[in-house]
Image: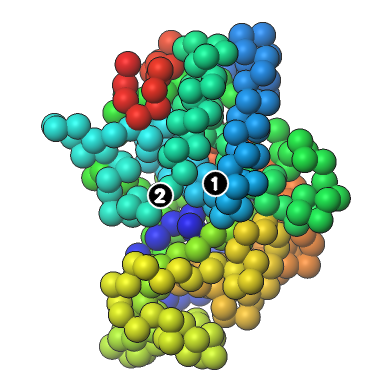
């Protein structure tokens, strides 16, 4: 499943590239910093933590290669609402509707993989490894195992695209209303996307790089159907969508609310993490309006073409931006808790 799911095309935005491409330092929100996050946080308290996560993720990928996208998406959706605190994993209660039951999250999956990881970790190191860190490590492992160098056997099976900082603690609150407000939407234009990312301390480069997660997974007709019919009063079809590709999509999506038909984010390559997504965007074949919105800004447009030409650069920058996102609004130290079960507070 794609990273995010439903504005009119904004005017072309040309901001100074020097400002937009400065290295991003993730902002600290809500009084919670990330100074206690570090690579290898569990090296003494639970030395096998990352190996256990990798083992379970690898088994899940071997059983079903499509699981990589849902694992990556869980981390994204967690960090964009209340920060990276595993609030996306909490179940709703009689008095509260949690994030996972918000409309944009109805298609989230792979909760069972996270639960399996947590169960193993609790047996090995009780109340030590947070669910928030499990999400971050599992996302890294999923995307690493999905790279084409892995599938071609050119990358060690235990190799990683990037190292994960750990030391997060789990939050105790989760709100469906907050998820509906803060999660990026598949119909977002560039100005809306910039605003959403900026609110998390993430910049234009992070926006362009993290959109590359759409190399993995599938979506459904409601996330893009408006692009095909009655787009605006001026355009019946989204003008940023290739007409031949649109014709194909119309044949697949005959009913606007069809949640059964799966649409590959990258046709023929939706289980492989690579830079093909960026080529499709330049050809007006990005599935979401938000994908094509990247061409509406000078900085993100330049990055799209740059990543299309250099997959190595994309992989390198993706790791940096995942670290940036993984620092958003984290709970560390004595804040939050270490849940015994990821779906419920202690």
Residue 316: % across, % down: 75, 47
Q: Which residue is mark 1?
A: 72
* In this view, 243 is above or below 38: below
288 relative position to 266: left or right? left
Q: Residue furthest right?
A: 154
Q: Looking at the image, is mark 1 or mark 2 earlier in the sequence? A: 1
Question: Can residue 52 be seen from the camera position used here?
Answer: yes
Dividing the picture into quadrants, the one containing residue 187 is bottom left
**Toward which corner of the image does residue 221 lie, by quadrant?**
bottom left
Regarding residue 20, the answer to whether it shows in the image is no
The residue carrying pointer 2 sits among few (fewer than 14), some (14 to 19) or many (20 or more) residues within 10 Å by Cα, namely some
* Residue 157 placement, left or right of 298: right
Q: Residue at x 39, y 80 (%)?
A: 253
> Which residue in the protein does label 2 denote?
108
Which residue shows up at 54% across the image and 91% down it? 244
Q: Is residue 320 above or below residue 233?
A: above
Residue 38 at what x, y percent from top left?
64, 22
Q: Residue at x 50, y 11 (%)?
A: 126
- Residues at marks 1 and 2, CA–CA distance in whole angstroms: 10 Å
Badge 2 marks a residue whose secondary structure is loop
């Amino acid at each position: 499943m794609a990273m995010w799911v439903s504005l009119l095309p904004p005017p072309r935005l040309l901001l100074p590239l020097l400002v937009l491409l400065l290295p991003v330092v993730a902002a600290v929100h809500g009084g919670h910093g990330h100074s206690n996050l570090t690579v290898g946080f569990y090296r003494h308290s639970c030395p096998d933590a990352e190996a256990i996560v990798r083992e379970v993720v690898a088994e899940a990928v071997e059983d079903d290669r499509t699981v990589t996208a849902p694992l990556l998406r869980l981390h994204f959706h967690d960090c964009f609402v209340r920060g990276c605190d595993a609030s996306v994993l909490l179940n709703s209660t009689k008095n509260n509707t949690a994030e996972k039951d918000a409309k944009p999250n109805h298609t989230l999956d792979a909760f069972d993989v996270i639960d399996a990881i947590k169960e193993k970790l609790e047996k090995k190191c009780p109340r030590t490894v947070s669910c928030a860190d499990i999400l971050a490590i599992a996302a890294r492992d999923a995307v690493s195992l999905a790279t084409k160098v892995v599938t071609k056997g050119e990358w060690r099976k235990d190799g990683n695209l990037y190292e994960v900082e750990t030391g997060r603690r789990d939050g105790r609150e989760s709100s469906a209303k907050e998820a509906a407000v803060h999660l990026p939407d598949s119909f977002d234009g560039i100005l809306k996307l910039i605003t959403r990312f900026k609110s998390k301390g993430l910049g234009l480069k992070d926006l362009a790089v993290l959109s590359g997660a759409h190399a993995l997974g599938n979506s459904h007709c409601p996330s893009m159907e408006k692009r095909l019919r009655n787009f605006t009063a001026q355009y019946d079809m989204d003008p940023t969508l290739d007409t031949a590709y649109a014709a194909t999509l119309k044949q697949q999506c005959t009913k606007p609310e069809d949640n059964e038909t799966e649409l590959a984010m990258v046709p023929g390559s939706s289980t492989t993490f690579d830079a093909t997504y960026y080529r499709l965007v330049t050809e007006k074949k990005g599935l979401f309006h938000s994908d094509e919105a990247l061409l509406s800004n000078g900085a993100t447009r330049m990055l799209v073409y740059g990543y299309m030409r250099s997959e190595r650069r994309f992989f390198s920058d993706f790791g940096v931006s995942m670290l940036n996102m993984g620092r958003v609004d984290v709970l560390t130290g004595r804040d939050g808790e270490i849940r015994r079960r990821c779906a419920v507070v202690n």
